[in-house]
Amino acid sequence: MAKPNRCSRRHFLTSTTVAAASAPLFLPGRIWAADGDARPNGRITFGYIGVGKQGRHLLHSFLPHSNVQVVAVCDVDTTRRLHHQKLVEDFYTTKQDKEFKGCAEYKDFRELLARRDIDAVVVATPDHWHAYPVVAAARAGKDIFCEKPLSLTIREARAMVNAVRENQRVFQTGSMQRSDGAFWKGCTLVRNGAIGDVREVYVSVGGPSKWCDLPEEPMEPGLDWDFWLGPAPVRPYNSVLSPRGVHDHFPNWRGYREYSGGGMTDWGAHHFDIAQWGLGMDESGPVEVLAPNGADVKRLTFKYANGTVMYHGGLEGYRFGAVFVGTKGKVCVDRGRFQAEPESLMNEKFETLPTQLYRSTNHYKDFVDCIRTRRKPICDVEIGARSVTVCHLGNLAYWHGRSLRWDPVREQFQGDAEANTWLDVEKRGPWKV
């Protein structure tokens, strides 16, 4: 497939840049929506927004699907962008046993979204760059796979849900533990009352992020640093945030508040997500979060309306990501393994239990299948939003050093005008959602 006409691309950027200055979001669905959803049995065309380490992993995850065709990659780093364009074209050259030159490359994701021939996008940018491309993609008629944690703020998460629903898009959050059989078994036991009433949940993940204090370094050639920052405040370049060239490690932008929520959102979007699944809270959440005070509250504590409490930190003696403690036993889950007490629970015939949870054995195939059927995937946008909201609530309690009462229906703090100003952060330039 040839690249889009260069003149039309320039015209698009010129017109939309002007529009962006006066409107909070462009690419309205009535203008850019595709003529129709992907045909049930046809090829599904993918574009990638962000091709760093995780984006490369997701390329390798979707490329082998016989009915998926990757036609575009986008990144603000020239070296990474061209590297992954070549990776895609080399893959199809080998697969077809003839030269393939059909993957376009873009620095600006708006150009990619303007293409009517792209059915779905994969968003694997840093967290502060999730919300705007997702909302724009939904309005452009694209189905979306977006990495976890879903958002930088609570308000962003709800804006993403609203855009996906309003435009009837299929959306998969990249919390792939839901497609791991160990977590499915563990949560199935909990949801079927196998350990009685759940009294406590222990979630072992890292702590909150901090404000960025990195020193200035010489600019990386080929990187559009201002575009990398996007909605975040202007600051000097540092390679910790965007390492030079193609690399094989996860950059530590995750550790800084301007771009992410630290371990609380990075791993929390996995393990708090599993806690939410096991508790049946995929469309709700806790009603209170207690900040540790060194006295009566020893660790960050979430309270649910039914009396269940969830602690940030593992249960002593149990090296698992999430541990459910009930009146009749325990369920402990982590990647590829689970443990239950009493041990007899591990021999349950899970497929015959009365309450059956959504079962996926491949997170990426599940997304592709749902594009065809138009059903919600195992980690739909609402699930991703609710799980990351738990993480954000924990961070807000840590950052501000006080307890908070939360209304999961209205998604506001109760009787706390100051705390309600923390639901979002200021966005730079036109990047508001």
Image: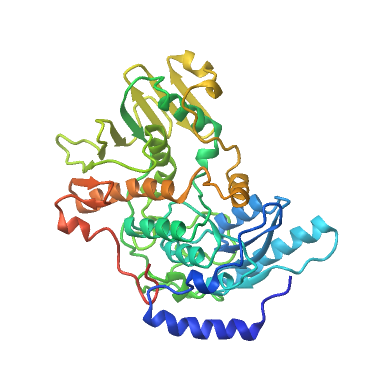
Please name the residue shown 57% across and 38% down the image.
360
The answer to whether residue 266 shows anywhere in this view is no
Q: Position of residue 307 (x, y in %)?
A: 24, 30
Q: Is residue 149 above or below residue 329?
A: below
Looking at the figure, which quarter contains the N terminus? Answer: bottom right
Identity of the residue furthest to the right in this view: 97
Looking at the figure, which quarter contains the C terminus? Answer: bottom left
Viewed as shown, does residue 51 lie left or right of 40? left
Q: Position of residue 61 (x, y in %)?
A: 64, 50
Q: Camera-side residue: 286 or 269?
A: 286
| The quarter of the displayed image where residue 252 is located | bottom left
Please name the residue shown 73% across and 68% down the image.
102
Please name the residue shown 52% across and 30% down the image.
182
Please name the residue shown 71% across and 56% down the image.
42
The answer to whether residue 166 shows anywhere in this view is yes
Viewed as shown, does residue 315 lie left or right of 30? left
Q: Is residue 250 above or below residue 136?
A: above
Q: Position of residue 114 (x, y in %)?
A: 57, 73
The image's colouring method is rainbow
Q: Position of residue 163 (x, y in %)?
A: 43, 61
| The quarter of the displayed image where residue 87 is located | bottom right
In this rendering, the count of numbered labels is 0
